[in-house]
């Protein structure tokens, strides 16, 4: 069969070359630009949507009058590809993408994932390992002498010395290995604008050492005699153990991790100094959070809300997940030890106004494929919208790492009324037929608001609702900084009653983690028995991955809790991690050989058989698992799949 070249329709509207941030010279020409102010190199495909950090920062800078271009997923074997838009005037900004490049590529078993959620058609090998380092090296080759600024979640979570799971070693700050001039950590709008503004005013990048939310390297002779902090309010730098110390001594790593966590509140966080050889990393205090007006202005920027036109004919899986969703807030005060959202987005909740959300719905209605269904209204969690400390003074002074563990803080405003009111307005907006909540519900907060649970069950659940109890053993949940299982069971009962009252057959989809520090094979057996007793069959289980900078990663590497210094058992062998996971998939015949091995290792061999109390059948025996009242299905996103922002 012969192929013919199809000609563009004469009636098709011309492509708007000014719609996106320029990715081509053609688009620069259409804007009348002969040079850029800022070039962003992005490890993800360019999707002009506010859920994608590179686009968010690019539009933010464009909105302040800068000429911003984007190079997405460039070749990394030659600097020519990143040079196609020319040398920018101010700086090159680099982000590995919405996920750490190693987490994006490899599973907990250190195997290559089946797809890259942030690449066209899920294609693999579209970005290098440790993309921040590789792109920074390319930028220095392509643009000698031009400032190179790192940002994004990979740089943010690797800003100090850190344990790297995939190489099983402590690595230096990514700022050292990349040889970049400056690193922006956390949500980057405030610091990136200050950097751009001061560079535009003629300052040299080497003088930008006082920008909140940034880190720089100080040469020998400029840091050794800096005064050391003696107490929190003195504003002096806190000296962390050096890279050489933390890579050689797990006690020093423990001390570094504990000290770092207590300096993450913008209200009282001190500068940090960490020597790396004869130089030192200097981290300024975190950037101040955005207020509601700032958040509204950010999400009101003119996003096209679709992938760049060069991807025509391809689908980008992460975009397909979020294209009809709305981000209402950022930040999380949960402080779960296995999650890095808090370390990147901060503990202070930053929310949009209802009017801003409704304006975004009008933008959604202009999308060709929008049919009136909003897939999610939320953020890192579904129900922290507009929740803050009751006192700004207390919030600025607070040194707690979680507002909800071991119990909900008495100073936390847990009122769900603003969220319930927002959901009603969204539901009643013109052109909206259904509004779902896909972000995980924080059930220890939700159980305090029967009105929210009624709203959730009556209007915003499509048969299944995602929640994350993670485990059922108190000792393991304490290591996670998660509430006890009794809180989950109370919420489950309330949700069931609300669903029944609404005349709906709806179920919870509980998510669990296997292999988390503190969890033994015996603990996982007890969790599997708990699941079987309730007729729950998890289809997908998250195998714990030690991501950079999380407290659970510190436990994994050191074998101790960084705050209590108590020993913490951790499954480190890949085989044992696989065995723990198999117990949660007790109902799956393909996992039975692993589950039997796990039961024998745990001394629970009596649970192998056909009795009602058994988990798996013996070798060669057909499964006689009783019918279940609830099948927990769906696909659990990797931590951070909902983009965490710039």
Image: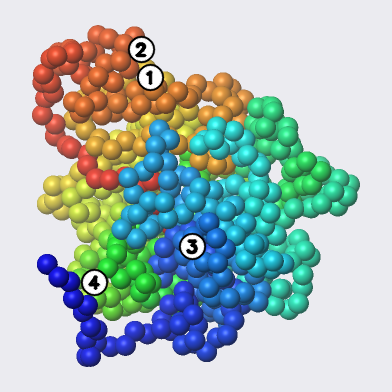
Residue situated in front as seen by the camera: 174 or 249:
174
Which comes sooner in the sequence, label 4 or label 1?
4
Quadrant in which residue 352 is drawn: bottom left
User: Up-down: is 506 above or below 539?
Assistant: below
Q: Which residue matches tag 4?
A: 370
Vertical arrangement, residue 390 with respect to residue 8, above or below:
above
Q: Quadrant of the N terminus?
A: bottom left
**Which residue is located at x 22 percent, y 39 percent?**
632
Mark 2 vs mark 1: give the one in front.
2
Asked if the residues shown at circle 1 and circle 3 are in contact, with their CB atoms under 8 angstroms apart, the answer is no
Could you tell me if the residues under marks 2 and 3 are in contact, i.e. CB atoms within 8 Å? no
Q: Position of residue 491 (x, y in %)?
A: 30, 41
Q: Residues within 10 Å of mark 4 (few under 14, many from 20)?
A: some
Q: Is the C-beta separation of discs 2 and 1 under 8 Å? A: yes
Distance, label 1 to label 3, CA atoms, is 44 Å
Query: Is 365 situated left or right of 252 in this image?
Result: left
**What colour scheme does the image use?**
rainbow
Judge whether 613 appears above or below 528 on screen. Answer: above
Could one spot residue 572 in this view of the protein? yes
Residue marked by disc 3: 74
- Give me the disc on residue 601: 2
């Amino acid at each position: 069969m012969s192929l013919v070249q199809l000609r563009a329709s004469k009636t098709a509207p011309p492509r708007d070359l000014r719609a996106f941030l320029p990715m081509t010279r053609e688009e620069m020409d259409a804007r009348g630009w002969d040079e850029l102010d800022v070039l962003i190199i992005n490890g993800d495909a360019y999707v002009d949507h506010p859920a994608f950090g590179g686009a968010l920062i690019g539009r933010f800078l464009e909105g302040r009058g800068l000429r911003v271009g984007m190079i997405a997923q460039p070749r990394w074997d030659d600097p020519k590809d990143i040079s196609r838009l020319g040398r920018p005037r101010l700086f090159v900004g680099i982000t590995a993408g919405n996920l750490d490049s190693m987490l994006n590529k490899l599973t907990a078993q250190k195997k290559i994932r089946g797809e890259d959620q942030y690449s066209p058609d899920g294609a693999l090998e579209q970005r290098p390992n440790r993309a921040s380092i590789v792109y920074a090296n390319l930028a220095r080759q392509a643009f000698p002498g031009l400032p190179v600024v790192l940002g994004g979640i990979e740089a943010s979570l690797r800003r100090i010395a850190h344990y790297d799971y995939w190489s099983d070693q402590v690595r230096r700050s990514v700022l050292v290995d990349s040889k970049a001039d400056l690193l922006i950590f956390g949500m980057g709008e405030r610091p990136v604008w200050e950097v751009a503004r001061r560079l535009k005013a003629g300052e040299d990048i080497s003088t930008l050492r006082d920008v909140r939310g940034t880190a720089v390297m100080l040469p020998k002779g400029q840091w050794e005699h800096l005064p050391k902090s003696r107490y929190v309010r003195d504003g002096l730098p806190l000296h962390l153990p050096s890279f050489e110390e933390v890579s050689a001594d797990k006690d020093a790593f423990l001390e570094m991790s504990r000290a770092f966590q207590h300096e993450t509140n913008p209200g009282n966080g001190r500068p940090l100094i960490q020597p790396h050889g004869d130089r030192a990393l200097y981290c300024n205090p975190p950037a101040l959070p955005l207020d509601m007006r700032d958040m509204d202005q950010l999400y009101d920027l003119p996003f096209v809300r679709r992938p760049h036109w060069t991807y025509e004919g391809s689908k980008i899986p992460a975009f397909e997940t979020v294209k009809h969703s709305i981000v209402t807030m950022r930040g999380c005060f949960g402080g779960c030890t296995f999650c890095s959202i808090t370390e990147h987005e901060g503990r202070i909740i930053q929310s949009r106004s209802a009017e801003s959300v409704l304006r975004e719905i009008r933008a959604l209605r202009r999308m060709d494929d929008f049919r009136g269904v909003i897939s999610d209204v939320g953020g890192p969690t579904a129900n922290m919208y507009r929740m803050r400390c009751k006192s700004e003074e207390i919030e600025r002074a607070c040194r707690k790492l979680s507002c909800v563990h071991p119990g909900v803080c008495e100073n936390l405003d847990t009122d769900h009324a603003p969220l319930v009111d927002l959901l009603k307005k969204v539901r009643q907006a013109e052109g909206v037929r259904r509004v779902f909540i896909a972000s995980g519900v924080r059930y220890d907060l939700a159980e305090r608001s029967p009105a929210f649970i009624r709203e959730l069950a009556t209007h915003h659940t499509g048969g299944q609702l995602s929640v994350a109890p993670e485990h059922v053993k108190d000792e393991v949940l304490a290591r996670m900084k998660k509430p006890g299982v009794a809180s989950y069971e109370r919420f489950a009962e309330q949700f069931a009653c609300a669903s029944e009252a609404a005349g709906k057959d709806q179920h919870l989809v509980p998510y669990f983690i296997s292999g988390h520090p503190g969890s033994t094979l015996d603990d996982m057996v007890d969790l599997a028995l708990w699941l079987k007793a309730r007729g729950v069959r998890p289809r997908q289980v998250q195998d714990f991955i030690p991501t950079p900078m999380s407290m659970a990663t510190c436990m994994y590497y050191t074998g101790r809790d960084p705050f209590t210094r108590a020993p913490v058992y951790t499954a480190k062998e890949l085989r044992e991690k696989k065995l723990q996971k198999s117990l949660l998939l007790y109902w799956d015949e393909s996992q039975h050989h692993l589950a039997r091995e796990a039961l024998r290792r745990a001394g629970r061999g009596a649970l192998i058989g056909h009795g009602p109390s058994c988990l798996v059948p013996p070798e060669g025996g057909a499964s006689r698992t009783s019918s279940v009242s609830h099948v927990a299905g769906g696909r659990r996103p990797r931590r951070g799949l909902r983009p965490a922002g710039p």
